[in-house]
Image: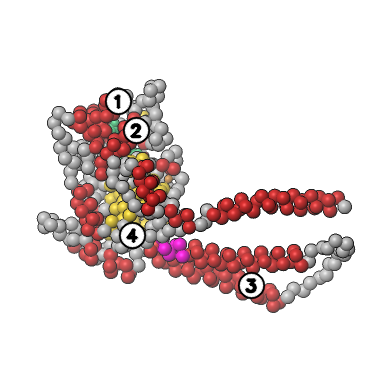
Amino acid sequence: MATDITFLMFSRFFHRVGILVLPILGLFLTACSRADLEVRQSTLDPKGPVAQVQYDVFMDTVYLVIVLFVLVGGLLVYAVARFRSRPGEVVKPKLEEGHGNPLVEIGLITASIGALVFIAIPTLSAIWYTDDVPKEAVATSKLSAWYPRVDANGKENYAKEVADQVLEIDVIGKQWWFRFEYPQLGLTSDAKRTVPNEIYIPRGKAVRINLRSEDVIHSFWIPKIAGKVDLIPGRKNYMWIQGDEVGHYYGQCAEFCGDSHAYMLFRCEVVEPEVFAEWVKSQKTDAAPVVAGSKAEKGKALFAAKTCAMCHNISGHFGAGNFGPDLTHIASRKSLAGAWLDNRDPKAQLALELKEKNTEASMPVDPAQLKANLIKWIGSSGVSHGADGKPTADVKPGNRMHYYKMFNVVGLRESHQKFTDEELDALAEYLLTLK
Ligand SMILES: [Cu+2]
């Protein structure tokens, strides 16, 4: 009797709660609606063949799971309704030894195998497809098919041996930012030409990505272009990507890597091949000399005096640093500090994305925003003291800007400086000239 009462209480409880739970569940389900397509990092909005294949596998699985859910759930609901005890009915326990039903058993086994095969075929073929650039894509994507071997000045852009290769990009993960190198095109550490946090790729061309880490495990992920692959210290990983629509894509480190992991973002700019060629050329130019007597000139002197040049390379001005991001073209980049700070006008950018319902649309760099970001970053990156005299690292906690290894073999040494507002302003003015 007691159990009957508790059962009744429970069923009433569930009945009431159910009325509440159902609409809440419905609310959760709205998250799966097309609204998702307006999200900057969405795997449900593929913009390249690799992401597309991965999306297809996901959807195949979802469809199968829906069928199974309806089937099993339907049978359960049917059984509960059909065999429920009715009021006044005396339920006699009826235990009979069953010998099973071979037809049902063989049927269930066959159906399970069928379901597995249904998922295994697209999964395996997707694994093969996404592993490395497929042969048919190499034909249209090899460098000689789209990238001029000799530029307008007759200067060789790449060696003859690489003409038949697809574009390769080395991705190096560091706590907490990405360094990109284009070895075939001369954008490398050795040449003092690397690109932090913003990867440029030509539209419609397959690109091979080599993934390396200089410290801990990171992961390379541009949700709309390709699924994630890890950067593992001491191991060479690779993947391939292709962007089919021009635009500004949001990427992210997808493997927990320490304090500022959540702030370790990057951007992927998919551009027309001609624009890409122009961009490479611009990356190879040195920084222009600063105007004598300008604020920027003061900033440049500070950059040398306040240890910045120890860690940062600025081709044409300073050449010793390689611990931090290359700053030669900092003023032309759309983001700062592991792409955490947006150098476009973030409010205008968001308004544009909402209005056009196009998260790949991108506004140009806003110099005022960039300057504000530079001051914010340098002033609170840990390299400088806060008002209370303690080092501050508000923008990216634990960031490596105030550590240096150079003079201390035993471990990391911290270095903190004090900056006046005027000095911060001069440094920012200097960096703003580095287009
Ligand atoms: Cu990370």
Identify the residue at horizontal 31%, vertical 38% (top origin): 369
Q: Residue 267, percent across and down?
A: 35, 49
The secondary structure type at the circle numbered 4 is loop
In the depicted structure, whether residue 430 falls above or below residue 279: above
Residue labelled with disc 2: 376
Q: Residue 285, percent across and down?
A: 18, 46
Q: Residues within 10 Å of mark 4 (few under 14, many from 20)?
A: some
Name the residue type under label 1.
Asp
Question: Closer to the N terminus: mark 3 or mark 1?
Answer: 3
- Tell me: 346 left or right of 64: left
Which of the 4 image quarters holds residue 260? top left
Q: CA distance from mark 1 to mark 4?
A: 43 Å
Q: CA distance from mark 3 to mark 4?
A: 44 Å
Residue labelled with disc 3: 109
- Between residues 222 and 139, which one lies in front from this camera angle? 222
Residue labelled with disc 1: 421
- Tell me: 280 left or right of 153: right
Q: Residues within 10 Å of mark 1 (few under 14, many from 20)?
A: few
Question: Closer to the N terminus: mark 1 or mark 4?
Answer: 4
- Between residues 304 and 152, which one lies in front from this camera angle? 152
Q: Which mark is residue 245?
A: 4
Identify the residue at horizontal 40%, vertical 56% (top origin): 224
Whether tag 2 and tag 3 are in contact, CB under 8 A, the answer is no
Identify the residue at horizontal 62%, vertical 64% (top origin): 69
Q: Residue 294, percent across and down?
A: 17, 30
The secondary structure type at the circle numbered 2 is helix
Name the residue type under label 3.
Ile
Question: Closer to the N terminus: mark 4 or mark 2?
Answer: 4
Q: Residues within 10 Å of mark 3 (few under 14, many from 20)?
A: few
